[in-house]
Image: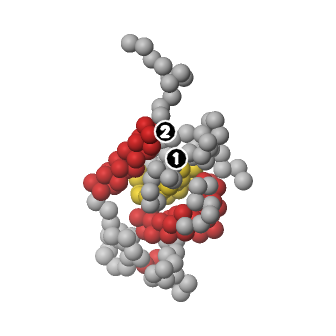
């Protein structure tokens, strides 16, 4: 059986289809797991009493969620999603650095982040960008781009010995 890896690269449509499949799979897997409710009191507490982090700070509002430092990834998904949607609505919507910088400004740890490239190996814009923040044994993962449609944000488990993203990532050295 002949193989043609370099001579016949996947078409743009095939790559778009693959990106859409990955996003759909992520949403399907996320939909199959039981997620705790999102909100200030979503942190599990064996005693059943609200945790100290369940009271929103005076600066946090429904329109502006705040990071829950002692919470889990699900507790912080609203902030991650809000930041992703803000950048997606800006002129920098297809810049991985814009998502990383905005997440840092929101209070996420830059050293726990990963991001994929903005350009293909031949210099064309990519069809989707993935970025993540590792939060304990979970990952906040976002995907944006022309083939993605609306931004996608999910909580996924850490990939053993690989961080959050399976894709090739670039250095966050700025």
Point out residue 56 in the picture as x, y percentages from the top left corner.
Answer: 48, 82
Seen from the viewer's position, the closer of residues 33 and 19 is 19
**Disc 2 versus disc 1: nearer the observer:** 2
Which quarter of the picture shows residue 90? Answer: bottom right
Seen from the viewer's position, the closer of residues 136 and 3 is 3
The image's colouring method is secondary structure
Q: Residue 127's mark?
A: 1
Residue displayed at 39% across by 74% down: 39
Quick check: can you spot residue 150? Answer: yes
Secondary structure of the residue carrying tag 1 is: loop
Q: Residue 12's mark?
A: 2
Q: Quadrant of the N terminus?
A: top left
On screen, residue 102 versus residue 69, left or right, reads: right
Residue displayed at 62% across by 61% down: 92
On screen, residue 171 versus residue 89, left or right, reads: right
Seen from the viewer's position, the closer of residues 3 and 53 is 3
Point out residue 138 in the picture as x, y percentages from the top left corner.
Answer: 44, 55
Residue displayed at 59% across by 69% down: 106
Seen from the viewer's position, the closer of residues 8 and 139 is 8
On screen, residue 164 versus residue 25, left or right, reads: right
Circle 2/circle 1 CB separation < 8 Å:
yes
Q: Is residue 171 above or below residue 151?
A: above
């Amino acid at each position: 059986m002949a193989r043609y890896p370099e001579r016949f690269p996947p078409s743009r449509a095939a790559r778009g289809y693959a990106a859409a499949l990955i996003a759909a799979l992520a949403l399907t897997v996320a939909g199959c797991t039981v997620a705790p409710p999102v909100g200030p009191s979503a942190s599990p507490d064996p005693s059943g009493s609200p945790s100290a982090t369940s009271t929103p700070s005076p600066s946090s509002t429904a329109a502006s969620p705040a990071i829950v430092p002692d919470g889990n990834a699900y507790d912080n998904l609203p902030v991650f999603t809000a930041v992703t949607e803000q950048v997606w609505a800006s002129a920098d919507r297809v810049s991985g650095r814009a998502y990383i910088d905005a997440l840092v400004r929101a209070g996420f740890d830059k050293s726990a982040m990963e991001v994929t490239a903005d350009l293909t190996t031949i210099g064309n814009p990519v069809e989707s960008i993935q970025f993540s923040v590792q939060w304990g044994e979970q990952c906040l993962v976002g995907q944006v781009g022309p083939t993605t449609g609306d931004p996608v944000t999910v909580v996924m488990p850490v990939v053993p010995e690989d961080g959050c993203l399976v894709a090739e990532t670039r250095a966050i050295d700025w």
